[in-house]
């Protein structure tokens, strides 16, 4: 569970903004942990590239890795896209090409962490929206993204990377590691992460990014899920660290948000209520409710204002 304070830090940090096609609210709270190791990002570029990036980073072993990701990973991704389009035409396979660009950005950022001797680690869950149509959910670790859809057809858009999962277990074993108590070498509860270079040194970044990355016990390689936005059905995304998911199941948090929307709560107020509920749901026997908390809610309202989206959501069951 990690070291805990005698009393929780209950101060909540809430920020939000609204655009023509989507709005977001970000909530975070240190909680019972001695330090805040979560970080988040949002980057909006409504130029020729037309890209929006939202991300949650759950750090471990210190805050330096997650903080670095929040500051630099979005710009690395944007730079990689810009570099690609300077050299190539638009006649491309969007899903494959964009996914490769994003994946290469993760490798590059992890290499930067290694060069800067940042040895802590972090998860990363990103929502990248391009041209207000193409969404890519990018996951390394066990933070999570879900999508609320009309008529309850909700979608889980990421899968936790745990050492006990068979594909992860095989890679760890092939790289000379083992899994004890559902942890890599009995220590790390994640099978994919930024940083954590003690688990990557056997094959670390040889030949300057030309080595095979999946041969490391712990890899930064993300899983990427593509979703074409349908504004008539898609309602809102949720990105959050496991401090949220320890208390809320996927469908539970969607029901909670929809119920609050019907009671005229704003996204910011909903974020506050979710964090408050977690602070009041600690369970020492299960070890839940004590973690840092970070949550991003992203409302989807194509060519309309957030106020219209609120009214629309109030009328839904």
Image (spheres, rainbow, N blue to C red):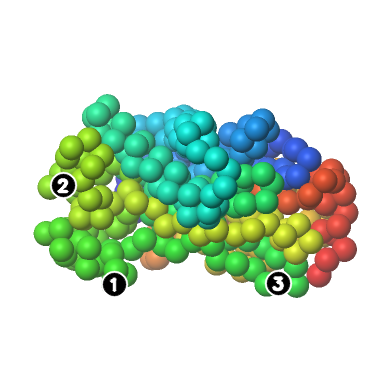
Reply above or below: 121 against 314.
above
Eye-nearest disc, 1 or 2: 2
> From this viewpoint, is residue 146 visible?
yes
Q: Position of residue 46 (x, y in %)?
A: 68, 33
Mark 1, other Cα within 10 Å: few <14 / some 14–19 / many ≥20: few
In percent of the image, x 75 and y 64: which residue is there?
233
Classify mark 3: helix, strand or loop. Answer: helix
Residue 203 has which mark? 2
Eye-nearest disc, 3 or 2: 2
Q: Which residue is mark 1?
A: 166
Q: Position of residue 230 (x, y in %)?
A: 72, 60
Mark 2, other Cα within 10 Å: few <14 / some 14–19 / many ≥20: some
Q: Nearer the viewer, residue 144 or 1?
A: 144
Q: Is residue 149 left or right of residue 252?
A: right
Q: Position of residue 22 (x, y in %)?
A: 73, 45
Mark closer to the chain start, 3 or 1? 3
Q: Are marks 3 and 2 in contact (CB under 8 Å)?
A: no
Q: Is residue 165 left or right of residue 314?
A: left
In percent of the image, x 87 and y 49: which residue is there?
308
Q: How far is mark 3 from mark 1, CA to CA? A: 30 Å
Question: Looking at the rendering, which quadrant does residue 197 occupy?
Answer: top left
Q: How far is mark 3 from mark 2, CA to CA? A: 45 Å
Mark 3, other Cα within 10 Å: few <14 / some 14–19 / many ≥20: few
Reply above or below: 52 against 283.
above
* On-image quarter of the N terminus: bottom left
Residue 152 has which mark? 3
Mark closer to the chain start, 3 or 2? 3
């Amino acid at each position: 569970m990690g070291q805990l304070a005698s009393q929780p830090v209950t101060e909540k940090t809430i920020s939000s903004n609204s655009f023509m096609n989507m709005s977001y609210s970000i909530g975070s709270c240190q909680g019972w942990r001695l330090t805040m190791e979560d970080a988040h990002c949002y980057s909006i570029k409504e130029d020729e590239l037309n890209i929006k990036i939202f991300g949650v980073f759950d750090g471990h072993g210190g805050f330096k890795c997650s903080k670095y990701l929040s500051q630099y990973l979005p710009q690395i991704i944007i730079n990689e896209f810009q570099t690609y389009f300077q050299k190539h035409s638009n006649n491309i396979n969007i899903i494959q090409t964009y996914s490769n660009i994003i994946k290469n950005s993760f490798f590059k950022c992890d290499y930067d962490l290694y060069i800067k001797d940042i040895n802590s680690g972090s998860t990363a869950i990103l929502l990248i929206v391009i041209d207000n149509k193409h969404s890519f959910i990018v996951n390394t670790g066990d933070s999570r993204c879900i999508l609320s859809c009309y008529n309850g057809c909700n979608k889980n858009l990421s899968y936790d990377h745990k050492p006990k999962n068979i594909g992860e277990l095989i890679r760890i074993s092939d790289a000379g590691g083992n899994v004890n108590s559902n942890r890599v070498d009995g220590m790390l509860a994640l099978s994919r992460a930024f940083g954590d270079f003690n688990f990557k040194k056997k094959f670390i970044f040889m030949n300057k990014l030309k080595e095979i990355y999946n041969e490391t016990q712990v890899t930064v390689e993300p899983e990427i899920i593509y979703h074409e936005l349908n504004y008539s059905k898609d309602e809102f995304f949720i990105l959050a660290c496991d401090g949220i998911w320890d208390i809320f199941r996927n469908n539970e948090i969607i029901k909670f948000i929809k119920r609050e929307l019907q009671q005229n709560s704003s996204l910011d107020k909903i974020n506050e209520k979710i964090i408050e509920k977690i602070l009041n749901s600690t369970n020492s026997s299960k070890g839940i409710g004590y973690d840092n908390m970070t949550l991003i809610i992203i409302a989807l309202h194509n060519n309309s204002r957030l106020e219209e989206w609120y009214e629309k959501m109030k009328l839904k069951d």
